[in-house]
Structures are given as C-alpha cells and as structure tokens.
Amino acid sequence: MAIEILKGKVNDSTLWYAQDMKDKSKWLHPISPSQQEEMLKALQFAKADNCTVDSMTKEKFPLPVLSAVLARLGHKLETGIGISVLRGIPLHNLSVEDTELLYAGITSHIGKMINQDTKGTLVGHVYDQGVSYESIEVRGYTTNAQLTPHCDSGDLLGLLCVRPAREGGINNFSCSMAIYNKLFETHPEFLISLYQGFHYNIRGNGPLGQNRDITSHRVPVFSFHQGKLSCRYNQKAILTAEELENSTPLSSLEKMAINYVAELAMQDEIRFDTYLEAGDLALINNNTVLHNRESFVDYDEADMKRLMMRQWINLPKARDLTFDFADHYNTGPRMGPAIH
C-alpha cells in the first residue's frame, strides 16, 4: 500500500514547543468547589445504583454542568495541543474502589475506556512493583526507573495522581509535531523509515499463538492520513522486538532514526516538564504527544507509596487512522490487548 507523506512541516493547532507551555492557562484547569461537589454527588448516585467501573456510563454518573465542559475538553484534546491537567479531583478520604469509580465516571463524559492488559483492566494502577526496566518482558510503569519517551494506546491517556513519590517522578511531555518538524529540518533521510514503521514487542499482549508477542505488521511512527499527522512511538518496544522470533532485523539507519526521535523528545526546546500533585488528572492525546517519567524515590510506608491510576480512552469523534497505525496489539484498530 502506498504511503502518504507530509511534504513539509506541521503548522496546525496541534503544534507546540516548551516555551508555549509557560502559559499555564493553556493546559491547567483548576476544579472549583462546586464542580468537586458535583463529582462527589455523581459518585454517590453511581454507588447507590451498584455501578462498577466495568458498567460505568455517563448516564450512571450524572454531571449536569460538568458534562458539557468535559465533552468540550475532549474535542480540544483532539484538535489542540493535546494536554490538559484537571487540578483538584476530590480524592480526600476516598477508598481505592471509590477513587476508581469516580475516575471512570468523570472520563465517561469524555470517551470510552479500553482494556490495558490481558486481564481486561480498565483502570490500571501505576506503581513500582520492584522489577527491572532492563528486562525485555517488563512494562516500564511497573518500575521506578526513568522511562523513555513513548505513547500509550487509545486516543487519550489518562493519569490520575493519587499519591506522588517522595522524590522525583516528574512527568515529561513532548509534542510529536515539533519532533517531526525538527526531523524534517535536520535528518529528513530518517522520515521514510519512520513512515514505514517497525514491528513492536507487545510483551504477550497479543492473541494467543504466533501474534502473541510481536505485531504482525509494521506500525508507522508517523502516519499522514486525511490531512492530519499522527505519531505512534515506543523506543523500547521497537528495539526489543528485534530479539523476538518472526522479527525483522533493523538496519543501522533505522536504529539511528528510532533513537533520534527519543533524543529530540527530550530536548529543552521541545520537552515540557510538570509535577503531578495528588488530585491531578492529566489527559494526553496519544496521537500528538509523547510522554515520559523521570525516576523516583518512594516512601517506605505502603499507604504512602506513589500511585497513579491510568486509563486508555477512545474519543467519540477522533481522527481517522490507517489500520496499520491504529492496530497496536493484533486485535484491531483502537483496541487494547487481547483478553486471555
């Protein structure tokens, strides 16, 4: 199939640089006391109806005022800079179960959750499980290590900070469009490889059989489709796929291209850093923004350790994507891992 390639730089509403994010009003949205009260009333309504995370819908979590606000936010995340942080989600004195339900209720007014693992998890817990990031089979979110720039699955990534770390754990965000523009300026010879894409190590999250561990097709890093450029990137997943059966060896040019994307994402002029506080809900467009997390030092006490709750969310009116770009786990476009 012919690859459509953007012939020039990106210059639309999804483009931003680190300097642009100094204006916090572009991405930070404080939750007012009345909005907090509306969320907590909706939580009690959902609990009275015996609603669960799996059965959550926006009708079961009524937000008379906030619903329209959240729907507009979803549209803005698709068409704008692709980052919003809702500050002040009312988590005080909530149990873990109630926090998950509140979180699922809020995002039900933005889009639909998809599963994140083979167990069908919709609200995942991101915390240090004491494993090594160096292992080919380990997913980075289960460690306390500094990660590499990447994007998750679904149109949006949601990260709700329940408890921050004792030290570190700063979140980095980079505009994929700014990375593309820098590539176009400095190393245009890398672009063909990045458009053609690579096989991914999907770490057992595909369907049982030969498609369990590696994508059956190349997944483009950049995909230009119907006038919009999208990005799908995970440095570790691409580089470690070479070690798996049925993989295609990477050329030296391909490896340079893959590593250069990560290098650009961490450049000062592109990278935007922020520290998520307890009660912050970060929403990130996976098609236009890469994210990363610095290493952290945790508390000794179990009930104080760093905890983020994660969602992968599909928007109701998202951009069209090509099949190869949108199929991340051999399960179909915009779908999560296979449920075993």
Image (cartoon, helix red, strand yellow):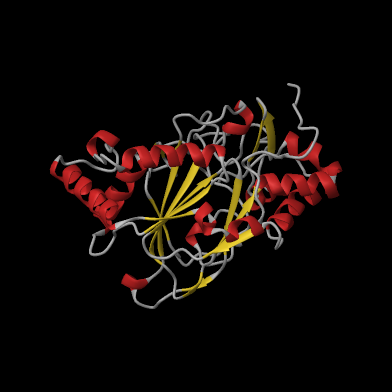
List x then y, in percent, for residue 142: 48, 60
Task: Say which quadrant the C terminus sits in.
Answer: top left
Position of residue 117 in the picture relative to residue 220 (left or right): left
Position of residue 76 in the picture relative to residue 241 (left or right): left
In terms of image quadrants, where is residue 138? bottom right
Q: Is residue 212 above or below residue 319?
A: below
Q: Is residue 206 above or below residue 168?
A: above
Residue 57 visible, this orientation: no
In terms of image quadrants, where is residue 328? top right
* 4 and 332: which is toward the camera: 4
Residue appearing at x 66%, y 59% in the figure:
19
Please identify the residue farthest to the left as the structure is shown.
48
List x then y, in percent, for residue 157: 48, 46
* 119 and 61: which is toward the camera: 61
In terms of image quadrants, where is residue 164? bottom left
List x then y, in percent, for residue 284: 51, 48
Give the tally of numbered discs: 0
Q: Is residue 148 above or below residue 12?
A: below
Residue appearing at x 38%, y 70% in the figure:
305
List x then y, in percent, for residue 103: 33, 49
Q: Is residue 323 above or below residue 243?
A: above
Residue 262 visible, this orientation: yes
Please identify the residue farthest to the bottom as the structure is shown.
300
* 216 and 268: which is toward the camera: 268
Position of residue 98 in the picture relative to residue 259 (left or right): left
Residue appearing at x 72%, y 39% in the figure:
10
